[in-house]
Image (tube, rainbow, N blue to C red):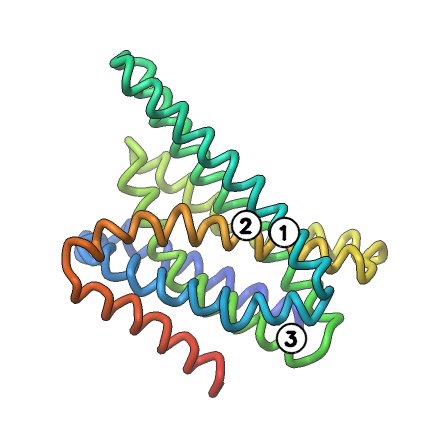
Amino acid sequence: MHIVMETLIISGMMLLLCSLPLLSSRVREHSKLFFLLGTGALAGLCVFDLLPDIFEMGGQRSLWLMGAVWLIYSVAHLFHIGHHDHAATHGHQQGEESTHTSENYFFLASMMAHCLASGMLLVVSEGLASEISKTVFFALLAHKSYEALTVSSILIDRQKSPKAAIFSILAYSLALPAGVLLTLIFKQYLTQGVAVIATSLAVGTLLGCLIFDFLIPSLAHLREKRQNWGWVILGLLVTQAVMRFV
């Protein structure tokens, strides 16, 4: 499938699914369900698909690069959380509001960085083996489905005005085609080393998002009801079935 068609399919699907929580309160009411399904789907894609693919591309070097990206993401995230807790402890209302706003921007920026890297990965995978290219496309299509619904619900819940929510959703949704466009513009400079770096960046940011924005927050839901484990497992199994049989 041509890269333009793949980009249009993924981006169109993201915009469509992102708009559902904005237009329907019933969808927002089931945001926890999408969140748990998405957690299982992302965990399965990282462990069973993307990590083996990135190792096949660049061996141990790609894993070290991915780990470095994840470490930088983790340090930034933990620093941000520490700053938020410090403001809350001192009880300054204005500081808390400012920190809450910066937390929203940090979440949006991290998801946009991940989508930008995902767009780069989509282009880079076109020059690799057909199986890797297919895996990347379906991996992005599958996990962006859950991710779009979840991220959109989170952004709508955190933003104070509908206009701010719409702006955030558009910025998030357009980051992937922006990554595709930038990579196509500079495609002549793409080498195997650049491809490994781009892939490591995409998977590293995805791993960071998975751990800090999905896995850790989902623990509260899993402790609340053990049955919620079923939704996580279902998301993992359905996504893996799609990856294996489509």
The residue located at (43%, 77%) in the rendering is 240
Upstream in the sequence, badge 2 or badge 3? Answer: 3
Q: Secondary structure at mark 1?
A: helix
Q: Few, some or many C-alpha atoms within 10 Å of disc 2 (few <14, some 14-19, many ≥20)?
A: many
Is 210 on the left-hand or right-hand side of 158? right
Q: Position of residue 105 (x, y in %)?
A: 44, 33
Q: Nearer the viewer, residue 55 or 38?
A: 55
Q: Which residue is mark 3?
A: 132
200 or 134: which is nearer to us?
200
As drawn, the label of residue 201 is: 1
CA distance for labels 1 and 2: 6 Å
Q: Position of residue 86 (x, y in %)?
A: 35, 19
Question: Three-letter amino acid code at disc 2?
Answer: Thr
Q: Are marks 2 and 3 in contact (CB under 8 Å)?
A: no
* Extreme residue toward the bottom, this view: 245
Q: Secondary structure at mark 2?
A: helix
Q: Is residue 68 above or below residue 103?
A: below
What residue lies at 44% left-to-right and 64% top-to-bottom? 143
- Give the residue at x 69% y 54%: 198
Return the mark for residue 32. none
Label 1 with label 2: CB-CB less than 8 Å: yes
Check disc 3 and give the amino acid type: Ile
Q: Quadrant of residue 62?
A: bottom right
Query: How far is the residue under mark 2 from the one under mark 3?
Result: 19 Å
The residue wearing badge 2 is: 205
Residue 184, percent across and down? 74, 57
Type of the residue with mark 1: Leu
Residue at (48%, 51%) from the top-left corner?
173
Asked whether 182 or 103 is in front, the reply is 103
